[in-house]
Image: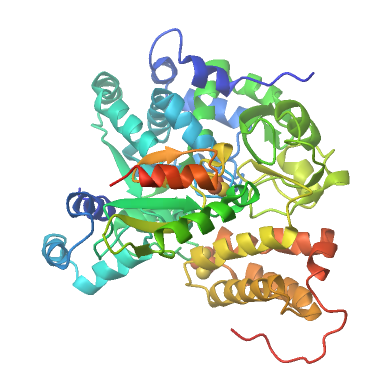
Amino acid sequence: MMKECKYIKEIIEKGTVEWPYRFFHQGLEMGRERCFRELEKSGLVGRGGAAFPTSKKWGSVWDTENVVLICNADEGEPGTFKDRYIMENNPAFLLESMLLSAFIVNARALYIYIRGEYTQAISLMKKEIDQADVVLDAYREKTGVKLEVEVVVGQGAYVCGDETSLINSIEGVRPNSRIKPPYPTQKGLFDAPTIVNNVETLCNLSLIIRDGGDFFSSLGVEGSRGTKLISLSGKIKNPGVYEIEMGKVSLREIIEELGGGIKGDHELKFVIPGGISTQLFVENEIDVMVDYCSLKQAGSALGSGAIIVADETVNAVEMAKNAADFFSKETCGICFPCKEGNRQIHNMLNKIYVFEGKREYLKLIREISETTSRAARCGLGQSAGNLLVSAIEKIPGDFTYYLPEIDLDRDEVKK
Amino acid sequence: MRILINALAEIQKEFGYIPESEIKRLAIDMNMQKAQLYGVISFYSRLYTEKKGRNIIRICKSVTCGMNGSQSIREAVIAHLKIGDSMTTEDERFTLELVECLGLCNVAPVMTINDAVYENLTAEKAIEIIDSFD
Ligand code: SF4
Ligand code: FES
């Protein structure tokens, strides 16, 4: 029986045993240059979904003044709840990781943007920040900066998980995403160079400072160093947050051994490996290792680590309709193809579901998602079609069940 | 520095929604046009410019909850309260919202009422819980 990896989880569950804020103090002692070198050695990449090398992002603001650091806790991808788990179980660990990161990037301002649905996490984080005078004093002594930690509460817009939308949201304008370049690291919040990192990414940094970059990069595999928190949900016996060493366990092992397998007397039908923006796998594809490269090679992605498991009672059309519903509602609408494309796809799936669809819709859906993904400015539009198109390709029977053998007339898809 | 969406949330906390008079005041305070403020508010699904029911029921309809039977919960609640998505009961007791993932998928299907979370629901349990509110 495979044992769960508990690297980050150990701290989250037990707390920092030695003394409070030890990672932060250790970092202050080491100084920002040495901390940064450890980060470079670690090979850490962002855990929010984009998997961008953290040292590259931070390196790009190294010599700039007035850096703003934002911790992105606007976890909204359906199936993802690992950041909530961190904040609810050990808010102090996240706060110290944020402060440590702020110290390394020499930040003048520190924000955490938490989705409004996470009421418990919000109050715990606020409470933690209110009690952090001593650490903030230590920060000031070391850097001369009187850092204030602002909590911004999201009000229900998935697109704010995108870093430029999130910045707009804090600025108080409509949170559409911005055209890049300029990148936030060049011109971000109120024009200041801005670093946006996910909750889990920042927590990893504390471990890099504790154990050194070399140790961290000894975990995992090339391109996917360290561990990953997985949000496991769906038709699974033991849903929850699990930690895995990247590249060392397969999707099947996670489902069967960590998750206890499928709930009840059913068979596995498909698995979504990285949230509803990623391509699904059917039963004979799930021996793939879970890390950024392996999943990419297999035609999907690790995303934010939301593994959703479906058994044979789950109808792929219903699931696709559900995902399309999400994207057509959450598109910010600024790129026309994303707005219109997601609406059209949503309409077609709804028609299919009530037996009013046509065979050609399946082809149209694929074409529209391709166009959308090319024309889209942010991750939402770029990946909205992944799941649907893979469902049509891999589970065609569920779709054709609803469709006539041949299309009799060829009028356009109407609203 | 004052963060607009936090300020809006505070107003909503006080009044239950964001009244016109407060928007006027805030526009002056933050040196913005009223129209700009409405533009921002309308983007967010959790901010309201109209009065809502005393209790806001949110039922998740995203993928994991969907797989675990949220459809039947939604249908039962809709039939029980005789209102649809984003509607408020006549007695202003409830507003119903069918929402996207609440980040509670490990205990799906889920519903929240105000800030309380109800996990691993069935239709019967959901109705029972709803009836315990006034
Ligand atoms: S891709 Fe879609 S969600 Fe992203 S900026 Fe364009 S319209 Fe908005
Ligand atoms: S899918 Fe319902 S809480 Fe995540």
Seen from the viewer's position, the closer of residues A151 and B16 is B16
Looking at the picture, the colour scheme in use is rainbow
Q: Position of residue B42 (x, y in %)?
A: 33, 67
Q: A137 or B59, which lies in front? A: B59
Percent coordinates x, y for residue B93 in the rendering: 28, 55
Residue drawn 61% across the image and 49% down it: B69
Seen in the picture, residue A292 relative to A316 is either above or below; the reply is above
Q: Who's the residue at 48% across and 66% down the image? A: A179
Please identify the quarter of the rendering in which residue A322 is found: bottom right
On screen, residue A362 versus residue B15, left or right, reads right
- Report x, y in % for residue A119: 36, 39
The answer to whether one can see residue A60 in this image is no
> In the image, residue A35 lies at what x, y percent?
49, 25
Q: Does residue A412 appear in the picture of this structure?
A: yes
Quarter of the figure with the N terminus of chain A:
top right
- Asked whether, in this view, residue A90 is left or right of residue A363, the answer is left
Q: Residue at x 42, y 22 (%)?
A: A31
Name the residue nearer the viewer: A7 or A205.
Answer: A7
Q: How many marks?
A: 0
Residue A188's place in the image compared with A2, above or below, is below
Quadrant containing the C terminus of chain A is bottom right
